[in-house]
Image (spheres, helix red, strand yellow):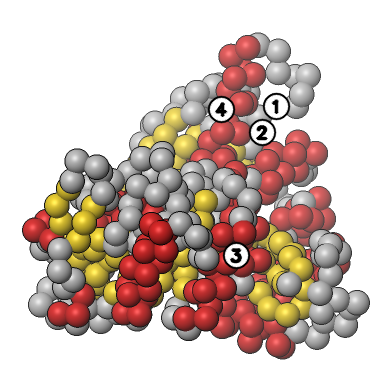
Amino acid sequence: MLPGFAMIGSGTQDFRLHSDTTIVARPDTLTDTALPVVVIVGRPNVGKSTLFNAIIGQRRSIVGDEPGITRDRIHGEGSYLGRPFVLIDTGGIIPNDAEMIPSEILKQARVALERAAQIIFLIDGRTEITGADRDLAKVLRKIGKPVTLAVNKIDSTVREGLAHEFHSLGFADLFPISAEHRIGFDELLEHVTAAFPVDAREPAPQPEKRPIKVAIIGRPNVGKSTLLNTLVGEERSIVSAVAGTTRDAVDQSLTHDGVEYVFVDTAGIRRKGKTKLMAEKMSVVMARRHIRMANVVLLVLDATEKVQALDATIAGYAHEEGRALILCVNKWDAAGDKGKRKFTEEIRDELKFLEYAPIAFVSAKTGAGVPGLFRMISDAYEAASKRVSTGDLNRFVATLEFDRNMKIYYMTQGSVRPPTFVVFTDKAKDLHFSSERFIINQLRKRFGFEGTPIRIKAKRR
């Protein structure tokens, strides 16, 4: 069962299984329901039945590798955040196919589509767009119902970039998901059910709050372990003046102002050539892995030293992974006569690519400034998770004074963490660096996004 998701009624009496593995519906009950109807459509073997089973929470559709297992439409009742609806799983649709069974599938699907309040168009994210996908997209556009494009089998952040290729089908609302691993469900269902009425008979459940994962990174002996101990209020990490004391990642969970955090103190990352012992080499590999798994990264700098090239290298790891980032200047109590303005200018000059990252001046030893990190972490996480509607983005595009040899038709947001936007232009090439930077700066000015990198992908309309 999904977080914030509940099953309403069993409905098991509506279907029976035959030995030939075809699901046959008994007399249609759709005409008797006042609930909004959500229909899952797509070509054969893209994962519609897996998605249906995952949402409903029961194994109602037969799942297998053979295309076309589901031939009749089946339906069940579900609810997301107190908004009940009817979910329909259609057979794989192949428009204009000459075979009798696919034609009957299309006929069955059309009956469901006539009642649909929302349509989930499911695509296989691991394959290229097929002719059947394009034909089905044309059919769905002609129907005139709200269509949400769900790109399935995107089971890792590395694969999320593949999902943006499917914007060429012409649907603004796109969500990368994994039906098998139940990734991306909350975003998809929250969008699909946003306009559905809440059942007044029961209070709407709140979505499950997941902990914010925070990786503490930096050069050896900048005070990462001391900072972790101060944050959690106990001696959790081994602290010493010997550089490289921490070799294993240390994690600690705590709740602050109702928000749960999981802090990971990673090993100090050294320069290449300085890492000779196998244990230290592995600790560096694990530190980079924890950066990849984190939601927010705290890059710890030493206020008693200048910003070094290794600081920039380590920051680059977090930036490349698209992690929300906070620059934490530690040992500020021992910084002497250094001023915050001068040190900030030095940071901005040496780490130009991190202009979006807020700076905190703290002393892990005395605790000065440390409590304020919780709010900064929470704000950075919310910024990285922010989703802007396509309507707001198109109004934003209309205000751009884009005096360049390129026309922007419209823009949509493809994913979050990091916020990734797809810009549709009249050119079959990537945006110039200056154009991309201009759009990112204007997005920050209009919508915020402080503390998180922004990705821009250009597509020809």
Name the spot of residue 113 as percent of width and height, x first: 37, 75
| Residue at position x 12%, y 73% in the image | 202
Query: Residue reaching furthest top?
Result: 277
Q: Which residue is mark 4?
A: 286
Read off the residue under disc 1: 270
Residue 162 percent coordinates (x, y): 62, 51
- Residue at the spot x=46%, y=25% of the render? 238
Q: Nearer the viewer, mark 2 or mark 4?
A: 4
**Residue with the mark numbered 2:** 219
**Disc 4 to disc 3, how far (Cα)?**
43 Å
Disc 4 marks a residue whose amino acid type is Met
Marks 1 and 2, how far apart at CA: 6 Å
Q: Which mark is residue 134?
A: 3
The answer to the question of whether label 1 and label 3 lie on touching residues, with beta carbons closer than 8 A, is: no
**Of the residues tagged 4 and 3, which is closer to the observer?**
3
Which one is closest to the eye, mark 1 or mark 4?
4
